[in-house]
Image (cartoon, rainbow, N blue to C red):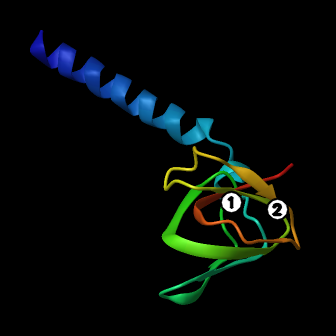
Amino acid sequence: MRHAIRTASAALSATALLLCTTAIPASASTDVANGTFYTSDLLNGYGELNDPTIGACYTLTPLILSASNQTDATAVVFSDPYCTVAGFRVDPGNTTTFQLWSVRFTRS
């Protein structure tokens, strides 16, 4: 009986793993904003994110005072490290002088 339960459990685990690996479309993991998102802060000078992943939240340093979106996607900048508070758009080719702490890229 125990052997049958272990076998069934292993089969279910293998099936779940197979479903998880096939349920995620390949494009979701490879969609990037082509280009560079440049930042400037008081302590570290300049920083950059090259080809950031669409939809990912990037936590930056809390001292960034300006950013330039030189990607082909819209950057949404936030005043908190979790991409939730006071977000606004920075379209491709534009710059902001907002004190930002995180950024997420979208296709809109």
On screen, residue 90 above or below 82: below
Tell me if 16 is positioned left or right of 88 in this view: left
Q: Is residue 33 visible?
A: yes
Q: Which residue is mark 2?
A: 73
Residue shown at 86%/62% (left/top)? 91
Percent position (x, y) of residue 55?
A: 66, 51
Tell me if 50 is positioned left or right of 70 in this view: left
User: Which kind of residue does numbered mark 1 sit on?
Assistant: Thr
Counting residues from the start of the chain, the first of labels 1 and 2 encountered is 1
On screen, residue 35 above or below 32: below
Q: Secondary structure at mark 2?
A: loop
Percent position (x, y) of residue 48?
A: 63, 81
Label for residue 69?
Answer: none
Pick the front one: 102 or 28: 102
Find the residue positioned furthest to the bottom. 45
Q: Which residue is mark 1?
A: 30
On screen, residue 14 above or below 24: above
On the rendered image, what quadrant is the N terminus found in?
A: top left
Percent position (x, y) of residue 106?
A: 76, 52
Quadrant position of residue 77: bottom right
Residue shown at 38%/32% (left/top)? 14
Percent position (x, y) of residue 49?
A: 63, 76
Q: Is residue 50 visible?
A: no
Q: Could you classify mark 2 by the number of other residues whose Cα lies within 10 Å: few (under 14), some (14-19), or many (20 or more)?
A: many
